[in-house]
Image (cartoon, rainbow, N blue to C red):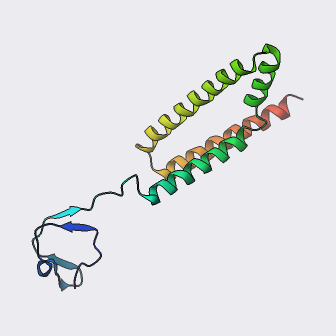
Amino acid sequence: MKLDSAPLDISGISQTEINLELKDSNDFNLTPAIAQPVQPVVADSPQMQQSAVVIFGTTFITIFLAEIGDKTQLSTLLMSAESHSPWVVFIGSAAALITTSLLGVLLGSWIATRLSPKTIEKSAGVMLLVISLMLFWDVFTSH
């Protein structure tokens, strides 16, 4: 049996030395070889660029739709109307949104190195549920 599709680069070994000998059903014996991992996909490849474009587009659309009509947009609208300096308000609000997004990305990547994606998803779901319950509680108790 040969290792035809293994993602390894076997340097300095002839093809006949790369045979996999099946001793019994659970014990494999590879002939002596130094196996080196194949280099990762280069970031300039079309597949990586496409996925970066997809990630960017998905992020942009999600955040754009989430921000329409929220408190931040309404606050920016009111500040612009009151100050009569729309460009200064735009620059200030854009800088604030960029800063909070940077904080979210940095914190998210730090958390991702310490927790599994499944744990992060469950934690985010629980936090959103708690926030929703707190908002409902506030609405019902304020009347």
Residue 87 in the image: above or below residue 102: above
Residue at (40, 53) in percent of width and height:
44
Residue with the most extreme top position = 83
Residue at (83, 33) in percent of width and height:
139
Q: Position of residue 81 (x, y in %)?
A: 82, 19
Residue at (36, 54) in percent of width and height:
42
Q: Could you say which quadrant of the image residue 45 lies in?
A: bottom left
Assign the N terminus to one quadrant of the image. Answer: bottom left
Residue 80 in the image: above or below residue 113: above
Q: Position of residue 88 (x, y in %)?
A: 69, 18
Residue 7 horizontal side relative to residue 34, left or right = right
Nearest the eye: 80 or 109 = 80
Assign the C terminus to one quadrant of the image. Answer: top right
Nearest the eye: 22 or 37 = 37
Q: Position of residue 49 (x, y in %)?
A: 48, 54
Q: Position of residue 13 (x, y in %)?
A: 11, 72
Residue with the most extreme right position = 143
